[in-house]
Amino acid sequence: MKRVIRFRLNTRLYEEEVQDEALALDWIRSTAGLKGTKEGCREGDCGACLVLMGGRAADGSTEWKGVTSCTLGMGDLDGRHIITIEGLAADGLTPVMEAMLDEGASQCGFCSPGFILALTGFLVSGVSIDPVAAMAAVEGNLCRCTGYGSIRRAAATLCADFADLPAGLAPRLALLASRKVLPPELAALMASPPEALGVAEAAFASIHPADPARVTIGGGTDYYVRNPDPEPDTAPRFSDQAPEARAIRKALVSGQAILELGAAVNTDDFFSSLLVRAMAPGIERFASDIASPPIRARATLTGNIANASPIADMTAILIALGARLVLEGDPGGERLVELPDFFLGYKKLDLHAGERIRGIVLPGEPVMFNFEKAAKRARLDIATVNSAIAVRMAADGSIAAARYAVGGVAPVPLRLKEAEALLIGKKPSAALARQLGALAYEAGSPISDVRGASRYRRRLMERLAWAHCIRLWPELRLEEELLA
Amino acid sequence: MKRNPDSIVNVLGKTLYVDDLPENAGMLHGAVVLSPSAHGRYSGLDESKALALDPSVRVLVAKDVPGQNQLGSAVLDEALLAEGDWHYHGQVLALVLASSRVLARRAAARVQILGREDLPAVTDPREAFKRGDIILSPRTQRMGDPEAAYKDCALVLEGRVESGGQEHVYLETQGAIAWPEDSGGARVISGTQSPAATQKIVARVLGVPMNRVEIETRRLGGAFGGKEDQANGWAALAALGAVKSGKPVKVYLNRRDDMLATGKRHPYSSDFKIGLSADGMILAFEADYYQNAGAACDLSPAILPRTLFHAAGAYRVPNVRVTGTMCRTNLVPFTAFRGFGGPQGLFVMESAIEQAAAVLGMDPVEIQRKNLLKTGDSFHYGQDVEDARAEATVTRCLQKARYETLRAEITAFNAAHKDLKRGAAAFPLCFGISFTKIMMNQGGSLVHVYNDGSVSVATGAIEMGQGVGRKIAIVSASTLGAPLASIRIDSTRTSTVANTMPTAASTGADINVMAAKVACDEIRKRLIGVAAARLGVEPSAVALEAGRVYLNAGAAATGSEARRDAGLSFADLVNLAYEQRVDLSAHGFYATPGLHFDMKSEKGHPFLYHVYGCAVISATVDTLRGSYQFDDAFIVHDIANSIDPIVDMGQIEGGFAQGLGWAALEELKFDDKGLLVSNTLSTYKLPDAHFMPRMDVEFYDKPNPTVVANSKAVGEPPLMYGIAGYFAVLDALKAAKPGKKGFYDLPMTPEKALRFLADDEPKEQGS
């Protein structure tokens, strides 16, 4: 669909008619003519096309994130500010570029703009400026030449040079401008993104059963992987990224505390939410298991669910947390569906014609939570299998409640009720872990594919069940017995 | 000028790769239609839906080729465009042109294959071998008599070793832009490592002599061997499209097409037999390498001998018999990749040592150390070992890694942990430098000094991030006596320097720096003549250095009179020469001396010198999940005199990363029907920053007098250090399963690791 949107690219404000579904990467390179943004994979896996995107955060403040422009639709740029390498380089070399140069961190150079943008974004938005955090910020960027040694040295130099960054966005932008990390003219514009021209639509419809071509996308991080050259007549509609759709709220329903998650809550929003962290203490440590920083900044929870991948990490996590979906019908009717029940078959959803996902509801009671993911590469990889567990303990040390989710062993993400039944009422032990493992081993009907053989998936299921027990009750040192 | 000017353009985002060059109005974009299975026949293509999409769409097939529809070089067995059948998944059936790339891709998706009939596909090289489907003839190299030697061995072991393929993942995918010429030929900007080879293929496809085709290569966004032979087809397709349409045509692959349609590192399946004395001396080694060559010959005949040359690794083995066979399968034609067959052979030898050590109850490092090559030994291909640096680098690396302490720490750690086990391994490197095909060891240059004092140096070298341009600039500047900042490395064009060789085999700097130096020496001689005449002194009294002319150049030696600035800058002198009608241009040519090899006896002197080094890598395995991480990599690398330490450090760390990826992460997977299933970056994982261990690299800097600037080639050798990564993980796995026999099936993956830990059968239904 064509429509007029308002956005800023570097220092220039555009009010421009764009093809909604067109990739920002293509627009930046072909229409704007800025060739420093590179196409390396066109599926969000290499970071060569990484740009910085500014816009409104869930709390209404301005946020800056690195995003992959190859999974970003033009329709989503309304009210946003994009920075490319040309914007950073407007006044010549910046300290980030100089650090890369001095360490020889740019060899063939194809990945360099992406790394420089990611590291600059880290200086703009990073919470703790240290080398570990800096390298975590480039976990969405691949370099095939350097082996990353020189990039690590450059990142360490930058962290030493910019250890004193202030906390707030405005003072930080001012400092970064004064120290030439950002051209001053650009920095002056970064605190306030442009106003969107489009009308906010505060709901998310995943797949339209009556018209499968008409999808609404969340962040686009799945959609564009499957549609790298989208046909103009299959134009997706864009879910609203307005602050209220990204809100995570606590509510009381019949005296019970619940968490309500808006349709556009993305992975970053979820893991950084204090409400989520209070409900599942320590859950934020699993954020780095999911995709990469630029993908987490865009991938929505509802999109991850609606994409219906049997191996979706966030879906497994949400199943264990007891998520229900709020589905809104066209006439305004509403129903709640348990998340596991939403998946009817491979990529088949319990979504009626005209229905859309309006949000997610989580029980509010605190749980002990663990997430396990087995993948070939520890970062930015799709799981071979994954599994999540949430338990509550009774006063006598037995398990009072449990939810157990597994992915990658069936056409749909599974909730293993048998596993839950096994756990409830029992005290954790190596024997119980073994029973749980045996049960998980038999779960589903895993297939063999590029990510692993069926037998490997079964073995992993057993081992991840053990891992859950070891991690949930570390004081029991179950590994001693399980691995004896 | 500490910073590499090439890199400055890179970090500013201003480097123009193939797809970044300004597009001419009317330029057409090409997309390819690829074969959908590993082996099949078809009766034709239905282009109607593609043509209906847009008036700009045009579909080109084999019959549109005006010259020969042939990409092969060693063997003419590879069609540019399929003719009624296909032999691998991803073979090009048609080129679709349209006014935009997205349109071309959509149109290509609408081309229908008519009368498709899939045929049985062979993916296993041993199966191809059994059927007699081999390319050319097997090659065997021998020294001594292994059969006889086994009688004296305390231990004789046999085993099978597998190593997988590897996708290059140069971040810039393959591409070319062609402009039609009124000669019937074309001018092509190509992302190739070998412009002269590309020129030859384009001329052949267009049916014109080579002098009507110009290839220019500016700079590649990575190549690693993947753009040596494999770039030719895309340039030829662009040229074909340009000549047929009369318009400029750009062919630039997206990642999926690139991964499907282009060759990768060869998978190998090998058998070995090793014999050792009771104290771990290797007395005999035999191996049979079944090279999975894929569906066409490509560079396989050049790659196979490098496997044979490196069969015995960095070790002195008195009795050797190694045989390699190129097996034709229904997979993409496998091709050059950094290391060029070397890593596959080296992994077999290291596997044999690891197994032998287990049986002898020794640390593999002990066997490695005992058998290192020494000066005066002989390689099994007849070359004498000169200036051996194996012991020096290995000793230093073990010291650097505190190997004894590390072993003790690992033992203590493993005793204290059940869920984590640590392991370590060393890898001693010896890698021969020179193209193994002797005629390829030549290179040319053309140097122009402009009358403002600026210098343009053109060679056959392709800059792809390895810093060859930087090395050429440094040596050219010092040879000419010009300021480094005055040197510009020109793009590589077939009309500037002809008949060049690919920038490959780690020889890019050795050969092209020398070719540039020859030309610069010539110009320097002329300039010194001009200066001497002007200053009224003998030429021997004049020196040119860093942009200034000095008098009494020999003064320091004779002690007669102090050296002094003659009051002339390099630019002044150039202008003087220009006014005096002195030629300020020169062509240089270099052919590596002393190389010879007799293919019949498989003996000779194929390498100018060898690069040595050692890596010690440690890893930690999660015994519950089978996952692992690499902790530390200590590397001592024989760089000799480094022309540019930052460039060389980048080559060592970067090469090692690719080797570690090959050894312990990157899994090129075909299904049993021969379809490539790891065909995107979401299914094919290469090292990211998190994957890489801490790296501590030290240069072993003893000068190498056999080449320019006493340096050593650095491109390929460090890749092999990754092999230690495989064995570090295996060492940790064996700590969890004491006494269990190892497995030799590279790459290591968490899946294989967990299978080992859980005692699962290696092959089961549906695996």
Image (spheres, rainbow, N blue to C red):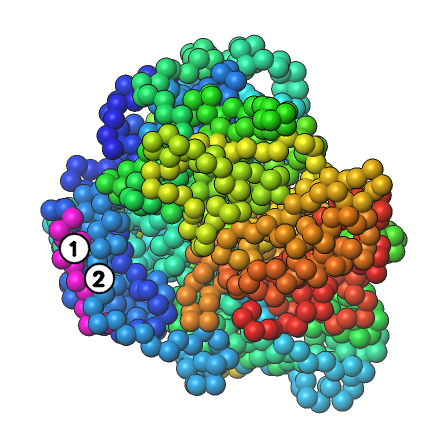
Q: Which chain carries label 2?
A: B
Q: What element carries label 2?
A: strand
Relative to residue B395, is residue B482 drawn left or right? Answer: left
Residue on which the image places disc 1? B49
Q: Residue B90 carries which label?
A: none
Closer to the camera in the image, A435 or B239: A435
User: Are discs 1 and 2 located on one and the same chain?
Assistant: yes
Quadrant in which the N terminus of chain A is drawn: top left
* Picture quadrant where residue A315 is located: top right
Q: In this view, does B153 lie to the left or right of B79?
A: right
Crowding near pointer 2: few (<14 within 10 Å), some, many (20+)? some
How many angstroms separate mark 1 from mark 2 (CA)? Answer: 8 Å
Disc 1 marks a residue whose amino acid type is: Lys
Give the chain letter at badge 1: B
Residue A358 seen from this side: yes
Observer-nearest of B747 and A245: A245
Residue depicted at 56% across the width and 73% down the height: B765
Left/right placement of residue B199 relative to residue B401 reads left
In the image shown, does A286 or B633 lie closer to the viewer?
Answer: A286
Q: Can you give x and y, in whole percent of width and height, for residue B712 in the image?
A: 58, 52
- Write down the residue under mark 2: B112
Tell me if residue B385 can be seen.
no
Q: Kindly check if marks 1 and 2 are in contact, taking CB atoms under 8 A apart as contact.
A: yes
Q: For the magenta stretch, what is the residue range?
A: B42-53
The residue positioned 78% from the left and 81% from the top of the image is B155
Q: Residue at coordinates 55% horizontally, 62% vertically from top-left?
A: A446
In the image, A195 versus B458, the foreground residue is A195
Q: What residue type is labelled 2?
A: Gln
Q: In terms of secondary structure, where does tag 1 sit?
A: helix
